[in-house]
Amino acid sequence: MATVAKFFRALGDPSRLRLLEFLLHDEHTVTECVQHIGLSQGRVSTHLACLADCGYVQSRRDGRRVYYRVADPRVADVIVLAHALAADNHAALACCDRIDAHTH
């Protein structure tokens, strides 16, 4: 149970989720991820390291560049399903104070 909760916590950060969505269809360098997400290179690298440690993304080095890609195609299924569930439950999620209260 704790492992599954950890699985979802890794997806709980909006920046990590945006990075995963960006990497779903193609591999990208850290620089491309920085440009897409709009965060500093250090923050993007930290998020990518978290996603790699959790098994969501893989990296490969090509000279001085490091390319990241989604490690398992089932990640796309999880993200698509999460979007659909969130859309279906938008009103309830918008009113939920418990989740936000626990993150601060």
Image (spheres, grey):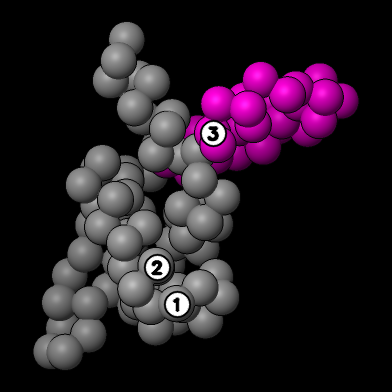
74 relative position to 88: left or right: left
Disc 2/disc 1 C-alpha distance (Å): 6 Å
Residue 15 in the image: x percent, y percent? 52, 56
**Looking at the image, is mark 1 or mark 3 earlier in the sequence?**
1
Quadrant, the C terminus: top right
Query: At label 2, which amino acid type do we have?
Result: Val
Q: Residue furthest top?
A: 1
Disc 2/disc 3 C-alpha distance (Å): 20 Å
Query: At label 1, which amino acid type do we have?
Result: Ser
Residue 91 sits above or below residue 62 on the image: above
Residue 23 in the image: x percent, y percent? 44, 61
What residue is disc 2 on? 44
Q: Residue furthest bottom?
A: 64
Instruction: Name the residue: 66% across, 20% down.
Output: 98
Quadrant, the N terminus: top left
Verify whether residue 94 appears in magenta.
yes
Instruction: Name the residue: 26% across, 57% down.
Output: 49
Q: Is residue 27 visible to the viewer in this orientation of the structure? A: no
Instruction: Name the residue: 50% across, 45% down.
Output: 13
Q: Decide: marks 2, 1 in contact (CB < 8 A)?
A: yes
Front of the two marks 1 and 3 = 3
52 relative position to 83: left or right: left
What residue is disc 3 on? 103
- Disc 1 secondary structure class: loop
**Would you identify the image quadrant in which residue 86 lies?**
top right
Q: Is residue 97 visible to the viewer in this orientation of the structure? A: yes
**Would you identify the image quadrant in which residue 90 lies?**
top right
- Disc 2 secondary structure class: helix
Residue 30 in the image: x percent, y percent? 35, 76
What residue is disc 1 on? 40
Query: At label 3, which amino acid type do we have?
Result: Thr
| Region rendered in magenta | 75-104
